[in-house]
Amino acid sequence: QKEVEQNSGPLSVPEGAIASLNCTYSDRGSQSFFWYRQYSGKSPELIMSIYSNGDKEDGRFTAQLNKASQYVSLLIRDSQPSDSATYLCAVKNDMRFGAGTRLTVKP
Amino acid sequence: DTGVSQNPRHKITKRGQNVTFRCDPISEHNRLYWYRQTLGQGPEFLTYFQNEAQLEKSRLLSDRFSAERPKGSFSTLEIQRTEQGDSAMYLCASSLVRGAETQYFGPGTRLLVL
């Protein structure tokens, strides 16, 4: 079983819609979770981190964490074409990354 | 620009040659990580340092790979006797061990082994 799993995608949404990205993890002791965005040919850049169960909002981005279900998600509201990228979920304890979900936002 | 730099940005080499990459982290960061990323995959953990000590190395990592961080500042990653399967993007990230320890990535070194 992979330590961090994400919907492989690709995920396509129209401009202005909500994009929902999901991630599950296997290490029940994990405490810190991160979402990174990676544009093609570039290195990952941090979007959000979350440590407690519940929701954390930052602008158009909302991270949701459910430790009991070992599940973390990222919602992007009012999606823009500039949000088109690969989104990587990472779990602390040596920063294991998922394979990423490629998101395309169509104008 | 996160403040993490990597050199060179691109490297083309022939199979069997040795290559060395350098990473300069954000100056106050005491942890430094190396990752490898291939197309369509997330970054794969290779190794990490806290100050000058190498605390963990991936079990999947070939012994052709070695990394150093001699003074707890910059780090080098060397690959000996390169193989075509080593072709990838090599990413360096640094962090400050405090709280959640967010990692900041450098631009990467893209390696092509012919």
Image (cartoon, rainbow, N blue to C red):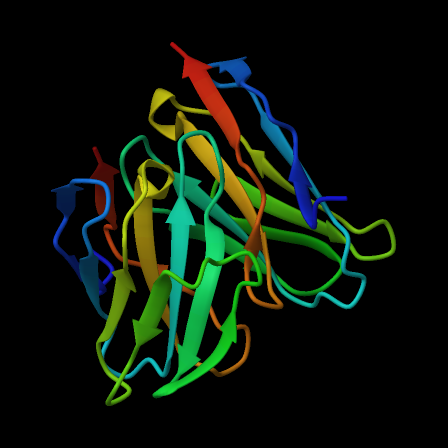
Residue A101 visible to an observer of this rendering: yes
The quarter of the displayed image where residue B75 is located: bottom left
Across and down, in percent, residue A46 comes to 42, 53
**On-image quarter of the N terminus of chain A:** top right
**On-image quarter of the C terminus of chain A:** top left
B114, above or below A71, in the image: above
Residue A78 visible to an observer of this rendering: no
B24, above or below B113, in the image: below
Give the side of residue A29 with respect to residue B33, left or right. right
Across and down, in percent, residue B92 comes to 32, 60
Instruction: Give the residue displayed 52% in from the left and 14% down from the top.
Output: A12
Instruction: Give the residue displayed 22% in from the left and 37% down from the top.
Output: B112
Instruction: Give the residue displayed 34% in from the left and 43% down from the top.
Output: B86
Instruction: Give the residue displayed 33% in from the left and 41% down from the top.
Output: B88
Across and down, in percent, residue A15 comes to 45, 15
Give the side of residue A1 with respect to residue B14, left or right. right
